[in-house]
Image: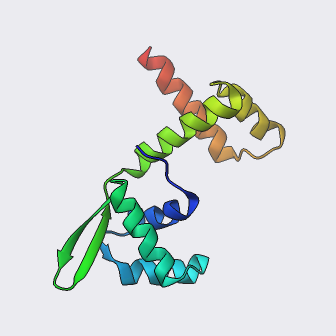
């Protein structure tokens, strides 16, 4: 998977939410949310096509875009990369940092406990 910039990720987030959609809809969403210009969005769409992160189908005169990368796959790759770079591959310091700053909600804690329980059962 090639490197995805933050601006390209904004386009991917739109496509993960709704796809296939036309460039006009992507432009409208990003113009509203992030104040991106039409030319910028079209450039980002073209870059993502070249990186094989998104695909398109021609429908009449319009192009409908859709993601070729699953959001969960992208998130896994990026989180693993982040943990490797920042925490030397260890998850505990990341979670401990959030817990220390009280950034973990009760829901977060319950999800983490469930994940650990499931992981222990699988071992």
Q: Quadrant of the N terminus?
A: top left
Q: Nearer the viewer, residue 94 or 67?
A: 67
Q: Nearer the viewer, residue 51 or 71?
A: 51
- Vertical relation: 56 (above or below) 91: below
Residue 70 placed where, x, y %?
Answer: 36, 50
Residue 7 placed where, x, y %?
Answer: 55, 64
Q: Residue at x 72, y 44 (%)?
A: 104
Q: Residue at x 45, y 68 (%)?
A: 44
- Which residue occupies the extreme right position in the image? 101
- Vertical relation: 101 (above or below) 13: above
| Left or right placement of residue 47 versus residue 20 in this view | right
Q: Residue at x 76, y 47 (%)?
A: 103
Say which quarter of the image contains residue 51: bottom left
- Vertical relation: 37 (above or below) 111: below
- Vertical relation: 79 (above or below) 113: below
Q: Nearer the viewer, residue 58 or 15?
A: 58
Say which quarter of the image contains residue 68: bottom left
| Left or right placement of residue 64 versus residue 85 in this view | left
Q: Quadrant of the C terminus?
A: top left
- Which residue occupies the extreme top position in the image? 123
Q: Nearer the viewer, residue 24 or 40?
A: 40
- Which residue occupies the extreme left position in the image? 60
Q: Residue at x 52, y 77 (%)?
A: 30
Residue 101 placed where, x, y %?
Answer: 83, 43
């Amino acid at each position: 998977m090639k490197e995805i910039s933050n601006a390209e990720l904004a386009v991917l987030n739109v496509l993960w939410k709704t796809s296939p959609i036309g460039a006009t809809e992507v432009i409208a969403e990003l113009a509203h949310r992030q104040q991106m210009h039409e030319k910028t969005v079209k450039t980002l769409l073209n870059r993502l096509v070249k990186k094989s992160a998104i695909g398109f189908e021609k429908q009449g005169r319009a192009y409908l875009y859709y993601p070729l990368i699953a959001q969960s796959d992208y998130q896994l790759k990026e989180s693993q990369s982040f943990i490797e770079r920042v925490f030397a591959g260890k998850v505990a310091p990341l979670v401990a940092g959030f817990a220390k700053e009280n950034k973990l909600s009760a829901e977060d804690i319950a999800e983490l406990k469930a994940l650990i329980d499931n992981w222990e059962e699988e071992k």
